[in-house]
Image (spheres, rainbow, N blue to C red):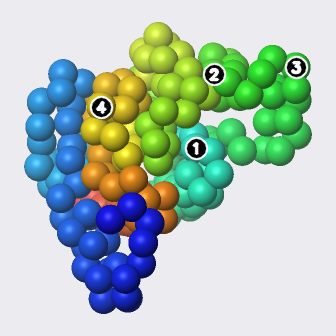
Amino acid sequence: MMGTVLDSTTYFNRLVELLINTKVTDLHGNGLTLDEGMDQAVELINGTRLTSAKVMVIGNGGSAAIASHLQNDLSKAVGVRSLVFNEPSLLTALSNDHGYSCIFERPIQMWAEKDDVLVAISSSGRSENIICGAQVAKEKGCRIITLSGFKPDNPLRKLGNLNFYIASESYGQVEVAHSTLTHLLSDMAMARSSE
């Protein structure tokens, strides 16, 4: 079911099915349950407090909106230091002067430090600027959480310490699922930070 909406019940049932069947893999491609993956992601996020590390979040388009929302929740509700690189003048300057593929690579190169966490969100998992950003973060010693969809062999899904994959080629379904997963992540991190 690509992007066809048959009726609301079918649409929502499909979303529930996609969320429950989220595929999670580690750095070596080993499968984890969704609960195991979320537990480890929460540990990475909340662990930044212990080392004064930070969380950086990147995404394009609808994924940029999800990235901004997650960064807001991490800062305000969870209380961890976090950054999002969605400032229009920065994005347009970097893309004008160096090309769109480097708009996340350059700020990550400047701001990332060992043990920081990068959350990289791409519906297709093929966005060159997201992949370049994740590769630089890896070189800098960051831990990486990816959220992707579309094809199961997308390149972003191979770059994270934790990789959350939604098995759909519908932008709407993948974005809604990613938004739900990031809400779950921030809600769990907030609950555990007060324990």
Occupied quadrant, residue 45: top left
- Tell me: 106 left or right of 160: right
Q: Is residue 171 above or below residue 128?
A: below
Earlier in the chain: of badge 1 and badge 3, it is 1
Occupied quadrant, residue 148: top left
Q: Is residue 99 above or below residue 7?
A: above
Earlier in the chain: of badge 2 and badge 1, it is 1
- The amino acid pointed to by label 1 is Gly
Q: Nearer the viewer, residue 62 or 133?
A: 62
- Tell me: 116 left or right of 111: left
Q: What residue did someone put label 2 on?
A: 105
Q: What residue did someone put label 3 on?
A: 97
Query: Residue shown at 17%/53% (left/top)?
Result: 34
Query: Residue shown at 30%/89% (left/top)?
Result: 9
The image shows residue 55 at horizontal and vertical percentages of 50, 38
SS label for mark 3? helix
* Cα distance in 3D space between marks 2 and 1: 12 Å
* Cα distance in 3D space between marks 4 and 2: 22 Å
For the C terminus, give its image quadrant. Answer: bottom left
* Cα distance in 3D space between marks 3 and 4: 32 Å
Q: Is residue 89 visible?
A: yes
Query: Mark 1 against mark 4, which lies toward the viewer?
Result: 4
Residue 59: give its label.
1
The image shows residue 190 at horizontal and vertical percentages of 37, 62
Q: What residue did someone put label 4 on?
A: 153
* Cα distance in 3D space between marks 3 and 2: 14 Å
For the N terminus, give its image quadrant. Answer: bottom left
Q: Nearer the viewer, residue 47 or 84?
A: 84
- The amino acid pointed to by label 2 is Glu
SS label for mark 1? strand
